[in-house]
Structure formats: structure tokens, C-alpha cells
Image (cartoon, rainbow, N blue to C red):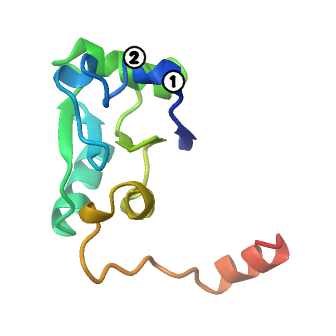
């Protein structure tokens, strides 16, 4: 399952930017990665963020019930991880490039200098052009 959404005011009460969410308040320009042990997708995203030197805060949903509630509010009632929040944007199982695209708008200090988003290949360009994107 992969989807992105913008957090609204109801999420603010329990979301990662609240005083009660994830144990402590977070800065508006922070990347928060909700994860759990033994999650292969979490390990891959964490490794990619570390390799790209992207600053982020890790929150283990098995150790933080409020963080688990935040993930459920984002992931349609499921505890699907990794779930990433960058400012008002919440993403479930995003790629590192999706995280950096959100960070470019909502947490520009977290984007490594010289980062270039990957360009679509031949098929991707064809699909984009065919769909008018």
C-alpha cells in the first residue's frame, strides 16, 4: 500500500507535530520516520536516508502508543510502516525520492546539497506524455 496525503487539523491533535504525538514536539521542517523492528521496508528506507545524509527522526511505533495511533490515522486504520511525515505531508511506504520531494517543499534544510531527483526513463516519459502530465 502506498499513498500520500496532507494532514489536516484533526491530525494535529495526535500527529507528530503535536506536543502529545510521538513523545515530543517536532519542528515544522523535520522528517519523521515511523518504523518498527523487523520491517524490511523500514530498513531499506532508513539505509537510503542515511546513505543520502538526510536528517530524520526515527519513532518506533512498538515503543510509542501515540506514534502507533498517528500511523493508524494516516494509514487508514493500519499500522503500515514506514510512514513518513514531512510538514503537512504524510506518506505510507514512500521511496527516498518521494521523501526528498516532500522535503524540498516542507523541509528544505533536510535536502542534501546537489540532490537531483531521478528523471523518468523512456517508458516513464511516454506515459507522462500520453497522460498529459
Identify the residue at image location x=33%, y=56%.
Answer: 107
Compared with 86, 96 (above or below) is: below
Q: Are marks 2 and 1 in contact (CB under 8 Å)?
A: yes
Q: Which residue is mark 1?
A: 9
Q: Secondary structure at mark 1?
A: helix
Q: Which residue is farthest top?
A: 65
The residue labelled by disc 2 is 13
Q: How many marks?
A: 2
Classify mark 2: residues with Cα within 10 Å, few (<14), some (14-19) or many (20+): some
Image: 22 above or below 29: above
- Tell me the quarter of the picture where residue 99 sits: bottom left
- The image quarter containing residue 112 is bottom left
- Indicate the position of residue 103 as horizontal and vertical percent values: 37, 58
Residue 62 lies, in percent from the top left, at 21, 19
Q: Nearer the viewer, residue 19 or 72?
A: 19
Residue pictured at 23% horizontal, 30% vertical: 36
Amino acid at each position: 500500500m502506498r499513498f500520500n496525503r496532507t494532514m489536516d487539523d484533526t491530525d494535529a491533535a495526535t500527529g507528530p507535530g503535536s506536543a502529545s504525538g510521538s513523545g515530543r514536539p517536532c519542528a515544522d521542517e523535520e522528517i519523521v520516520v515511523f518504523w518498527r523492528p523487523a520491517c524490511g521496508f523500514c530498513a531499506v528506507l532508513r539505509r537510503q536516508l542515511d546513505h543520502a545524509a538526510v536528517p530524520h527522526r526515527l519513532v518506533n511505533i512498538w515503543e510509542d502508543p501515540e506514534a502507533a495511533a498517528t500511523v493508524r490515522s494516516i494509514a487508514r486504520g493500519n499500522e503500515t510502516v514506514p510512514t513518513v511525515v514531512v510538514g503537512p505531508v504524510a506518506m505510507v511506504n514512500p521511496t527516498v525520492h518521494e521523501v526528498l520531494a516532500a522535503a524540498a517543499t516542507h523541509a528544505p534544510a533536510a535536502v542534501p546539497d546537489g540532490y537531483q531527483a531521478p528523471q523518468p526513463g523512456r517508458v516513464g516519459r511516454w506515459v507522462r506524455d500520453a497522460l498529459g502530465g
